[in-house]
Structure formats: C-alpha cells, structure tokens
C-alpha cells in the first residue's frame, strides 16, 4: 500500500467515525490531504471502491490479531483459537469505525454496512485464508475438505459475534474453542 493510499484510508476512517459515511467525499479527502480530487480517484477509485478499501484495511487490523494469537501459541491449536477469537472480539468491542458502520448512527445511507453483512465474500475469503494458513502449522486430524468446513463455520460464527455480540469475548471464545475441539477430535 502506498503512503498516500494509507493516508486516504486513515482520513476516510476518521470521517466515518466522526461524521458518518455521507461526510466522505472525494473533494473533502483531497482537501484534507492537500492533493487533487483526481489524485484521490487515481489512488482508490470511486466511492464504492473506497468503501471496500476502508473495510478491507480494517479487516487487516482484525486479521493481524488472529495471526498474532496463532504465532503466540504454536504448540496448542485450541489455545491459539481461543486467543484469536477473544482477541478479535475484544478488538471489536472498542473499534470506533466498526461501531460507526454497524450502528449507522450518522445516517443509514451507507455503502459500508453491506460489505460487513450481505456482500461479505471478500471479507470471508480473506479471514478464512488467514485462519487456514495459521492452521497449517498444526497437525490436525481432518482432511482438507473437512478442515475448510470447520474454518468456514468458525469464521462465520465469530463474524456474527463481531457484528452482534451476545456474550463476553471470553465466554464466546470459550464456546468457539469448545466447538473447535469437537470438530478437531
């Protein structure tokens, strides 16, 4: 990612958090960054592409939590899963951008929420790829097709709790770890 793209995404995230998606315009971004509007378009595309880029950049921050949890527990897959789920859910609790998007407190007219709820292909694929890659470091008793199913179930379940928590991060992580233990048995 280029420094300019990073800056555009950072300013966009701040605007979304403070004022909502409707406050984000290419002209405003250009003014905030001291570049031309065309430069913003050249770097991120039109507003729908900007929405996707912001969501994917935030996803990278969540996935870094997952990767770190697996890296910290190389000898125990269930401890790694628990740490990853708990870390993601704790990160989600305090994530102002996620809360701004999910609650749509600054106006419901947003291109962002569908990227987290109904048009999640890129998000799911990226999350499943990171989890699958992390699990390659463990000896697991599943063939690849069954492991893919287990990863899909866990990722979708955790995403649902990111969007709409129903318990504490610790309790949810314990439940996911229990289910993972059953799938990996």
Image (cartoon, rainbow, N blue to C red):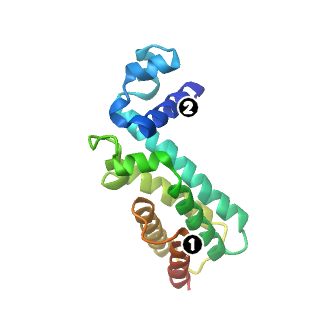
Q: For this view, does 14 lie left or right of residue 71?
A: left
Compared with residue 113, is residue 11 higher up or lower down, i.e. above or below? Answer: above
Looking at the image, which residue sits at the far left?
Answer: 109
Q: Quadrant of residue 23?
A: top left
Compared with residue 37, is residue 180 higher up or lower down, i.e. above or below? Answer: below
Q: Position of residue 173 (x, y in %)?
A: 55, 72
Q: Which residue is identified by label 1?
A: 170
Q: Which residue is identified by label 2?
A: 6
Residue 95 or 39: which is nearer the viewer?
95
From mark 1 to mark 2, how far is it between C-alphas?
Answer: 32 Å
Q: Position of residue 11 (x, y in %)?
A: 50, 30
Residue neighbourhood size for the residue with mark 2, other residues' Cα within 10 Å, grouped as few (<14), some (14–19), many (≥20): some
Where disc 2 sits, the SS reads helix
Residue sitting at 26 percent across and 40 percent down? Answer: 109
Q: Quadrant of the C terminus?
A: bottom right
Q: For this view, does 144 lie left or right of residue 164?
A: right
Residue sitting at 48 percent across and 53 percent down? Answer: 126
Where disc 1 sits, the SS reads helix
Compared with residue 69, is residue 138 higher up or lower down, i.e. above or below? Answer: below
Residue sitting at 33 percent across and 46 percent down? Answer: 104
């Amino acid at each position: 990612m280029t420094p300019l793209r990073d800056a555009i995404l950072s300013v966009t995230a701040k605007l979304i958090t403070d004022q909502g998606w409707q406050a984000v315009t290419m002209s405003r971004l250009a003014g905030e960054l001291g570049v031309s509007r065309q430069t913003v378009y050249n770097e991120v595309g039109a507003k729908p592409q900007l929405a996707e880029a912001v969501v994917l950049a935030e996803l990278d921050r969540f996935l870094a939590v997952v990767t770190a949890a697996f890296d910290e527990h190389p000898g125990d897959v269930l401890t790694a899963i628990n740490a990853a789920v708990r870390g993601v859910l704790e990160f989600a609790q305090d994530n102002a951008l996620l809360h701004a998007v999910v609650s749509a407190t600054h106006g419901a007219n947003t291109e962002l929420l569908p990227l987290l709820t109904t048009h999640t292909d890129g998000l799911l694929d990226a999350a499943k790829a990171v989890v699958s890659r992390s699990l390659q470091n463990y000896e697991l008793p599943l063939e690849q097709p069954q492991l893919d199913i287990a990863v899909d179930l866990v990722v979708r379940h955790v995403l649902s709790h990111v969007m709409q928590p129903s318990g504490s991060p610790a309790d949810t992580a314990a439940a996911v770890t229990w289910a993972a233990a059953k799938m990996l048995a």
